[in-house]
Image (cartoon, helix red, strand yellow):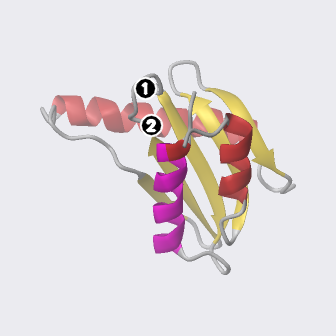
């Protein structure tokens, strides 16, 4: 069942430990939708910065001739947070990624990755 962007963002914020979530266009670096109210996390800045992370990884994969590989997710581990970046691969969603910031003390990383994958599968852009 396909869900809207708003529902997908709400579902991501329901993940235990979620601080903020964004859907980002990595061609422009623009956040197409955000949700979260943490004062220490500016989702617009995070969207732009994580766009550079995705672009760098894609360039590196190209240089390594990893043409048959795809990024499932990128994990950035901070002392108090996890940042998950999940490039979307479904038809019509290429060029976008989901970004999820989690409070490391409250989050279960394995469950968060699984749930983010499910949210990607349900999302209709």
Which secondary structure lies at badge 1? loop
Q: On the image, which quarter does residue 23 sit in? A: top right
Residue numbers of the magenta segment = 109-121
Q: Which residue has dot 2 on it?
A: 88
Q: Residue at x 55, y 77 (%)?
A: 108
Q: Would you say residue 7 sits in the magenta stretch? A: no
Mark 2, Cα crowd under 10 Å, few <14 / some 14-19 / many 20+, is many
Q: CA distance from mark 2 to mark 1?
A: 6 Å
Is any part of residue 23 visible from this angle?
Answer: yes
Q: On the image, which quarter does residue 14 sit in? A: bottom right
Q: Residue at x 77, y 52 (%)?
A: 41
Query: Is residue 122 left or right of 56 when viewed as pictured?
Result: right
Query: Is residue 4 left or right of 95 when viewed as pictured?
Result: right
Mark 1, Cα crowd under 10 Å, few <14 / some 14-19 / many 20+, is some
Q: Is residue 110 above or below residue 75?
A: below
Which secondary structure lies at badge 2? loop
Q: Is residue 103 above or below residue 88?
A: below
Could you tell which of marks 2 and 1 lies nearer the N-terminus?
2
Query: Is residue 104 left or right of 19 when viewed as pictured?
Result: left
Q: Which residue has dot 1 on it?
A: 94
Q: Quadrant of the N terminus?
A: top right
Q: Is residue 82 above or below residue 50?
A: below
Counting from the top left corner in percent of width and height, residue 16 is at 67, 72
- Between 92 and 52, the residue placed more toward the observer is 92
Q: Spot the residue most to the top.
A: 28
Counting from the top left corner in percent of width and height, residue 91 is at 39, 26
Counting from the top left corner in percent of width and height, residue 77 is at 51, 65
Q: Spot the residue most to the front.
A: 1
Is any part of residue 42 visible from this angle?
Answer: no
């Amino acid at each position: 069942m396909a869900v809207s962007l708003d529902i997908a963002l709400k579902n991501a914020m329901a993940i235990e430990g979620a601080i903020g979530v964004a859907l980002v266009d990595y061609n422009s670096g623009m956040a197409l939708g955000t949700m979260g109210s943490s004062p220490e996390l500016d989702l617009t800045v995070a969207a732009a910065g994580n766009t550079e992370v995705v672009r760098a990884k894609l360039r590196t994969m190209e240089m390594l001739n990893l043409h048959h590989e795809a990024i499932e997710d990128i994990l950035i581990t901070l002392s108090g947070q996890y940042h998950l970046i999940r490039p979307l691969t479904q038809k019509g969603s290429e060029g976008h990624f989901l970004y999820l910031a989690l409070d490391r003390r409250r989050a279960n990383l394995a469950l968060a990755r699984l749930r983010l994958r499910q949210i990607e599968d349900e999302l209709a852009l």
